[in-house]
Image (cartoon, rainbow, N blue to C red):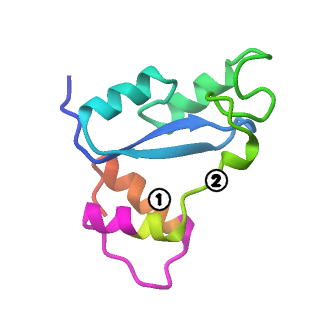
Amino acid sequence: MDKIEFPRLVYRALKDGKTCEHHLVEEQEAYDEKLADGWYGSVPEALAAGAGAPAGKPGSDGSDSHGNGKDDEKPPTRAELEEQARKLGISFQPNIGDKKLRTRIEIALQGGGQ
Protein backbone atom coordinates (compact mmCIF):
# COMPACT_ATOMS: atom_id res chain seq x y z
CA MET A 1 0.00 0.00 0.00
CA ASP A 2 1.25 3.50 -0.83
CA LYS A 3 2.38 5.74 1.99
CA ILE A 4 -0.04 8.59 2.63
CA GLU A 5 1.56 12.03 2.79
CA PHE A 6 0.33 14.73 5.12
CA PRO A 7 -1.20 17.23 5.28
CA ARG A 8 -3.99 16.05 3.00
CA LEU A 9 -7.68 16.58 2.43
CA VAL A 10 -10.56 14.25 3.18
CA TYR A 11 -13.94 14.66 1.48
CA ARG A 12 -17.64 14.15 2.16
CA ALA A 13 -20.46 14.56 -0.36
CA LEU A 14 -22.96 17.35 0.15
CA LYS A 15 -26.70 16.99 -0.20
CA ASP A 16 -26.67 17.93 -3.90
CA GLY A 17 -24.60 14.81 -4.62
CA LYS A 18 -22.41 16.76 -7.03
CA THR A 19 -20.05 18.57 -4.69
CA CYS A 20 -18.07 17.79 -1.58
CA GLU A 21 -16.97 19.54 1.53
CA HIS A 22 -13.39 18.95 2.57
CA HIS A 23 -11.28 19.00 5.70
CA LEU A 24 -7.52 19.21 6.10
CA VAL A 25 -5.91 16.52 8.26
CA GLU A 26 -2.33 16.80 9.44
CA GLU A 27 -1.49 13.24 10.52
CA GLN A 28 -2.41 9.57 10.12
CA GLU A 29 -4.45 9.37 13.33
CA ALA A 30 -6.68 12.28 12.34
CA TYR A 31 -7.02 10.81 8.84
CA ASP A 32 -8.13 7.44 10.23
CA GLU A 33 -10.65 9.13 12.54
CA LYS A 34 -12.17 11.07 9.65
CA LEU A 35 -12.42 7.94 7.49
CA ALA A 36 -14.18 6.14 10.35
CA ASP A 37 -16.55 9.10 10.62
CA GLY A 38 -17.77 8.91 7.02
CA TRP A 39 -15.14 10.96 5.19
CA TYR A 40 -13.26 9.69 2.11
CA GLY A 41 -9.76 10.00 0.71
CA SER A 42 -10.90 11.25 -2.71
CA VAL A 43 -13.72 13.23 -4.28
CA PRO A 44 -14.89 10.31 -6.49
CA GLU A 45 -15.15 8.02 -3.43
CA ALA A 46 -17.12 10.62 -1.48
CA LEU A 47 -19.51 11.31 -4.35
CA ALA A 48 -20.06 7.59 -4.96
CA ALA A 49 -20.83 7.02 -1.29
CA GLY A 50 -23.10 10.06 -1.16
CA ALA A 51 -25.06 8.93 -4.21
CA GLY A 52 -25.76 5.58 -2.56
CA ALA A 53 -27.02 7.01 0.73
CA PRO A 54 -30.64 5.93 1.25
CA ALA A 55 -33.31 8.44 2.26
CA GLY A 56 -33.45 9.08 5.96
CA LYS A 57 -29.72 8.77 6.42
CA PRO A 58 -27.66 11.76 7.55
CA GLY A 59 -27.57 14.33 4.81
CA SER A 60 -30.98 13.52 3.34
CA ASP A 61 -32.55 16.46 5.17
CA GLY A 62 -29.81 18.93 4.34
CA SER A 63 -27.73 18.11 7.39
CA ASP A 64 -24.29 16.57 7.32
CA SER A 65 -23.36 13.20 8.81
CA HIS A 66 -22.99 14.84 12.22
CA GLY A 67 -26.56 16.16 12.15
CA ASN A 68 -25.38 19.72 11.58
CA GLY A 69 -27.68 21.83 9.43
CA LYS A 70 -27.06 23.24 5.97
CA ASP A 71 -25.66 26.43 7.45
CA ASP A 72 -22.64 24.43 8.64
CA GLU A 73 -21.77 23.38 5.08
CA LYS A 74 -19.48 26.26 4.23
CA PRO A 75 -16.62 26.22 1.76
CA PRO A 76 -13.21 27.09 3.16
CA THR A 77 -12.54 30.78 3.58
CA ARG A 78 -10.00 32.59 1.43
CA ALA A 79 -7.66 32.78 4.43
CA GLU A 80 -7.93 29.01 4.97
CA LEU A 81 -7.15 28.34 1.31
CA GLU A 82 -4.12 30.64 1.38
CA GLU A 83 -2.83 29.09 4.61
CA GLN A 84 -3.20 25.59 3.20
CA ALA A 85 -1.46 26.59 -0.04
CA ARG A 86 1.46 28.06 1.91
CA LYS A 87 1.76 24.89 4.02
CA LEU A 88 1.94 22.85 0.83
CA GLY A 89 4.47 25.18 -0.79
CA ILE A 90 2.11 26.24 -3.56
CA SER A 91 2.96 29.59 -5.12
CA PHE A 92 0.10 31.81 -6.20
CA GLN A 93 -0.64 35.40 -7.17
CA PRO A 94 -2.83 37.48 -4.83
CA ASN A 95 -5.50 37.80 -7.53
CA ILE A 96 -5.93 34.04 -8.10
CA GLY A 97 -9.54 32.90 -7.78
CA ASP A 98 -10.62 30.68 -4.89
CA LYS A 99 -11.70 27.88 -7.23
CA LYS A 100 -8.35 27.81 -9.03
CA LEU A 101 -6.43 27.92 -5.72
CA ARG A 102 -8.56 25.08 -4.33
CA THR A 103 -7.83 23.05 -7.49
CA ARG A 104 -4.08 23.62 -7.10
CA ILE A 105 -4.31 22.48 -3.48
CA GLU A 106 -6.18 19.31 -4.44
CA ILE A 107 -3.66 18.52 -7.17
CA ALA A 108 -0.77 19.03 -4.76
CA LEU A 109 -2.41 16.79 -2.16
CA GLN A 110 -2.86 14.07 -4.76
CA GLY A 111 0.85 14.26 -5.58
CA GLY A 112 0.42 16.07 -8.90
CA GLY A 113 2.73 18.98 -8.16
CA GLN A 114 1.71 22.56 -8.72
Residue 5 vertical placement versus 31 (above, below): below
- Disc 1 is placed on an element classified as helix
Label at residue 57: none
Mark 1 = which residue?
103
In the image, what residue occupies the spot 37% across and 67% down?
A: 83
Q: Is residue 92 left or right of residue 87?
A: right
Q: Determine the image quadrant of residue 113.
A: bottom left
Q: Position of residue 14 (x, y in %)?
A: 67, 38
Q: Position of residue 30 (x, y in %)?
A: 33, 34
Residue 73 vertical placement versus 40 (above, below): below
Q: Quadrant of the C terminus?
A: bottom left
Q: Nearer the viewer, residue 106 or 35?
A: 35
Q: Earlier in the sequence, mark 1 or mark 2?
A: 2
**Mark 1 vs mark 2, CA separation in Å:** 17 Å
In the image, what residue occupies the spot 79% across and 16% down?
A: 56
Instruction: Tell me the amino acid under the disc marked 2.
Output: Lys
Highlighted magenta segment, given as a residue range: 83-99
Mark 2 = which residue?
74
In the image, what residue occupies the spot 50% across and 85% down?
A: 95
User: In the rendered structure, does residue 85 fall within the stretch colored magenta?
Assistant: yes
Within 10 Å of the Cα at label 2, are there few (<14), some (14-19), or many (20+) other Cα atoms?
A: few
Q: Quadrant of the N terminus?
A: top left
Q: Determine the image quadrant of residue 15.
A: top right
Q: Is residue 31 left or right of residue 57?
A: left
Q: Position of residue 108 (x, y in %)?
A: 32, 55
Residue 86 vertical placement versus 7 (above, below): below
User: In the rendered structure, does residue 110 fall within the stretch colored magenta?
Assistant: no
- Disc 2 is placed on an element classified as loop
Instruction: Tell me the amino acid under the disc marked 1.
Output: Thr
Q: Position of residue 38 (x, y in %)?
A: 52, 24
Task: Kindly indicate whether the residue at mark 2 contacts the one at mark 1 (C-beta within 8 angstroms).
Answer: no
